[in-house]
Image (spheres, grey):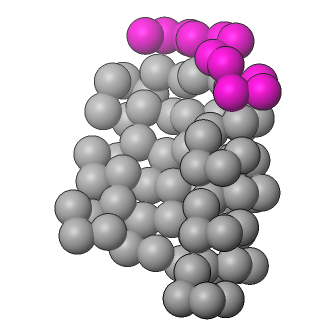
Amino acid sequence: KNDKYDGHGKFVGHRGNKYNGNYKQHRKNGFGTETLPNGDVYTGTWKMSKKWTGTLIKTSKNNCIEQYEEGVIKVDTKC
């Protein structure tokens, strides 16, 4: 819509980051999964491109797990 992402889509950045999920007004919004080049994966909801409610598994740090609730890290295990 107006040259901006809106709805469901996939994106691969020039640095190798990948996102598969929903967009609103060219920002990650709703459910989606982001995979970073180092192997870290966040799955959950986004609010205006901010991790909102979900899980980040940091494979780059021995599978450290961060739980997000309303944009704030609530649980940080094995880090």
From the image, give the main secondary structure of the stretch colored magenta: strand
- Relative depth, front residue between 23 and 33: 23
- What's the residue at 59%, 61% (across, down)? 27
Q: Position of residue 41 (x, y in %)?
A: 49, 46
Q: Is residue 70 magenta?
A: yes
Q: Is residue 14 left or right of residue 57?
A: left
Query: Could you say which quadrant of the image residue 17 lies in?
Result: bottom left
Horizontal side, residue 21 vs residue 56: left or right = right
In this rendering, does residue 44 appear at all?
no
Which residue is at a point 47% across and 21% down the rendered structure image? 64
Q: Which residues are magenta?
A: 68-79
* 44 relative to 54, above or below: below
For the N terminus, give its image quadrant: bottom right
Is 52 covered by the magenta stretch?
Answer: no
Q: State which quadrant residue 55 falls in.
A: top right
Q: Position of residue 7 (x, y in %)?
A: 74, 79
What is the number of callouts on the image? 0
Farthest bottom residue in view: 2
Asked whether residue 63 is in view, the answer is yes
The answer to which quarter of the image holds residue 18 is: bottom left
Outermost residue to the left:
15
Indicate whether 54 appears above or below 8.
above
Q: On screen, 77 above or below 36?
A: above
> Quadrant where the C terminus lies?
top left
* Residue 66 at x, y percent in the picture: 58, 22
* Position of residue 76 measured from the top left corner of the image (x, y, whole percent): 57, 11
